[in-house]
Image: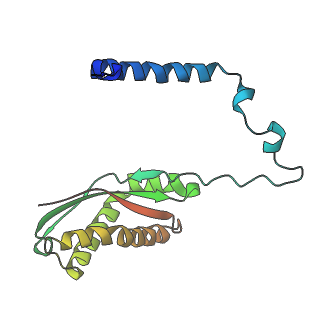
Amino acid sequence: MSVSIVSLLPPAALALALSLGFLGAGAMVMQLPTDVLATRDAASSLPPEGAAEPPAPPAPPRYVAMRDPIIVAQEDINGRLRVEMGVSAEDAQEEEVRAVLRDDFAPMQARLAQMILDLAATIEIADPGKFHLREALPGAARTLLNDHFEALGHGRPIREVFIVSYASR
């Protein structure tokens, strides 16, 4: 009868041995000189002379949260709906957007609430329809907010509206 050594070791000891083996291999690789690990010639990684530098990747969008949630209640939406939203603005106008959302939010909040009610009246609001309303909100809110900012003389700075929280009762 032949018994292998691996079958005699408990599983925990086998796991420990494998972990220590990987740890040791990693430590050995970290001790190698960097030129051993490099496979390309350092000069080949430089751009050719006279070549234009590649364009910088666009900055990731920064989001600005709206100060207060939008809360609406009506039969069309089967009770009460509470929506928290945020926006992504053009980089050059981010501070203007932040200031308007902070200082002049009440008129915008009322217009957003009315927009939600108007949108709810055009979409079937049975339980599955609530998701249709949620999907339609960002686009409609973006248009409304850009119209508001344009009326204030700020152009159309809103790139994206996102839903932070959407709860109905």
Q: Describe residue 26's horizontal placement relative to residue 33 as left or right.
A: left
- For this rendering, which residue is in front, 122 or 127? 127
Q: Is residue 136 left or right of residue 40?
A: left
**Residue drawn 48% across the image and 24% down it:** 22
The percent position of residue 159, horizontal first and vertical second, equals 49, 64
Image location (x, y in percent) of residue 93: 55, 57
**Residue 55 picture quarter:** bottom right
Q: Residue furthest front?
A: 1
Above-or-below relation of 158 to 22: below
User: Which quadrant would the C terminus be assigned to in this image?
Assistant: bottom left
Image spot of residue 149 (x, y percent): 46, 66
Identity of the residue drawn at 71% across and 26% down: 34
Farthest residue, direction right: 49
Residue at 38% from the left image edge and 71% from the top image edge: 139
Residue ID at (41%, 23%): 18
Position of residue 157 in the picture relative to residue 71 (left or right) = right
